[in-house]
Amino acid sequence: MHRVGVKWDGGPTYTARSGSRSRRVISYTFMYILLQLGTSTSGNDKLTWRQPASAENIQLHITMSSEEVEAIQEELAIVRASIESLQETEKALTCRLATLLDGGTGHEDAGNYVLSDDLEVPQEKSRRLNKQVIDFTSAFQPSSSDQEKLPWSWTQALHETMKKIWGIESFRLNQEAVCNAVLSNRDVLVIMPTGGGKSLTYQLPAVLSEGTTLVISPLVALMADQNMHLKEAGVPAEMLNASTSRQDAALIMKRLLHSVVDQKPKRGSKSSKGKEKAHEDDLAPIKLCYVTPEKIAKSKTFVSTLQKMYGAGRLSRVIIDEAHCCSSMGHDFRPDYKQLSILKTLFPDTPIVALTATCPPRVMVDVLKILKLGPITNADKARPTGTVLFTSPLSRPNLHYQVLKKPATNTDLIDQIVEWIEQNHSGSQGIIYTLSQKDTTTVAQGLISQSNGRITTGIYHASLSDSHKHQVHTDWREGSIQVVCATTAFGMGIDAPHVRFVIHHTLPKSMEGYYQESGRAGRDGQDSDCLLFWKTSDLLRLSGMVASEVDGIPKLYSMTKYATELDRCRSLLFAEYFNTSHSGADSVLPFSQEACGNCDNCKRDPSEIKQEDLSVEALKICDVVGYVNKMGGRVTLVQLGDLVRGIGTPMSTIISNSQARKDADDFLADVPAGIPAPDLSEGKVLLKKEVCFSIP
């Protein structure tokens, strides 16, 4: 095996085996960069090619096959698109920097995305429409029941197909309007509550459109769920992920391109009719193709297939489900989602439809920038260009929220969960979310044991095999499993309409996550329960886990405030968070501003709530923390709770300064006048440990 090398004179040499396509002559990407830089140099830096000493007398002939040429062209296309994307990012950052240096606020970019009927929209490339001119200044929502008077030719087909395939008689709020915008080939951003029917808004247009709709989803479970539903309804859909075999992936990509399968059944052979029928089924066109974002970010072959589809007019539109995953400001950021910025560069005329249920204002701005979507235009009076925004009320009046304190032991907690399920939802399907994979097994086994087998369970988490997860999901949907005990891997987009309850065994990390997960209950519109168990030790566990995440601690603090609230409506707490928290501006998200009347706080008798001023105790605790920090010590919340109550580890063993150990009593001198200091003998905080934990 011969080697060739490339080097800068006086610099390192990069080698690759000439017989290896994957490592041929450095890499195609590196070669492209060298070519972009040029080979002419100044001074002593010269780009030279040399053969290793062991092969000086061998003339190396490298013959590139057509397949290799195509591979280089594919990679060059991706590299060029990446360079264009980086150049655009550089331009935006340069403008932002100039604004900041000139004394600007730095929010000018965000201003391009606010809702305004007077918004000046920059000229965009004209969009290919569905064979007719649409008056985009009118609402997408039909204003007449007379279909002949409507401006859209597909209205009748829309209703008939929905009834025929999905068995649905009428649209929910905003669904038809979104379908009209999607079929009009507009870029669209849809913010709807979990269970609001987002899937139908792109699945139905996909059935009525030529070509294939590409759907990018974050989780394998989500894709499996969607494919299961579609195939049961007779809609040709496929999915590509890491578990898809090479043979199946190749066949799916041939179907996407409408290629002919190489090996056809021979005529006249035994069972040839059956084989021909199977062959025809194999070549059936695909209406919806589900992929994970990793396919876009890492599979050059698949991106090449999409480019061919785009060139042939077979790429109908791109759907980005759970679009908040693009933003590092969101609660479920996925790095590969950020790579979806390449889509508008590679496929400028292909519409993008982004959907989410959790999108605070600054997350929305970030998503629009990452996906390179145009400025927002309100669906009620949409302009000819820009991204059409649809929002639906995010409150779910059929969901009854309740928060309970955890019992002291896990056995007592399982007993309480079993009793609650059997009293309120005997025989009904539900989900129990746990913090760790280990907890899923512990809770599932506990439910079976302590219900004497009356409650059937399954476990679901990321470390299980895809086949196991698929089987659990199927069994649960078919009713052979009553309760799935799962981590958040049993996640976004799970669409089982008859889920009557969602229980959180542990405090979630954020309000966004809790809204998503609890929203999997009651998707059929029937009354359902969302029960959250929590105690302060949950906070201790979670604080270390989220400390390195963007806004991790503030989000956990907001979740803790929600759990500890006793008198304000749970729905209003969601509204307050999503409308203002972590956004810097009031939101356009349509949460109800009226109390739900169904949550535990709305139903609570005000006389049950005892209010007490703990300002003095809070100051004592903060003073102790400040002193320990000043003396170079470290203290856990458990130690702090004991310390301020005058028990446990003495302060002199916590602080690291040797002099301070001897003079721990000098702490008294640093305490503000009138505030008695907690020490080992007097001035103790007379509160329960968990109350002490929650005060800081």
Image: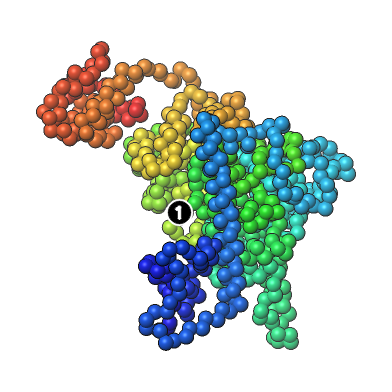
Location of residue 625 (image quadrant): top left
Front residue of 442 and 650:
650
Q: Report helix, strand or loop for mark 1.
A: loop
Indicate left or right for 443 with 305 as reference. Answer: left
Front residue of 44 and 49:
44
The colour scheme used here is rainbow
Residue 26 in picture, x, y percent from top left = 46, 70
Residue 416 in picture, x, y percent from top left = 41, 39
Location of residue 116 (image quadrant): top right
Residue 543 in picture, x, y percent from top left = 37, 39
Residue furthest toward the right?
148
Residue at screen point 19% across, 18% down: 669
Residue furthest toward the front?
43
Quarter of the image with the N terminus is bottom left
Q: Quick check: can you spot residue 599?
A: no
Indicate left or right for 631 with 303 as reference. Answer: left
In the rendered image, the vertical position of residue 160 relative to residue 601, given as above or below? below
Front residue of 314 and 450:
314
In the rendered image, the vertical position of residue 118 relative to residue 266, given as above or below? above
Question: Identity of the amino acid at label 1?
Answer: His
Residue at screen point 12% across, 30% down: 659
Residue at screen point 81% across, 44% down: 134
Front residue of 62 and 606:
62
In the rendered image, the vertical position of residue 331 relative to residue 62, given as above or below? above
Residue at image mark 1: 461
Residue 642 in picture, x, y percent from top left = 24, 30
Residue furthest toward the top?
674
Quarter of the image with the C terminus is top left
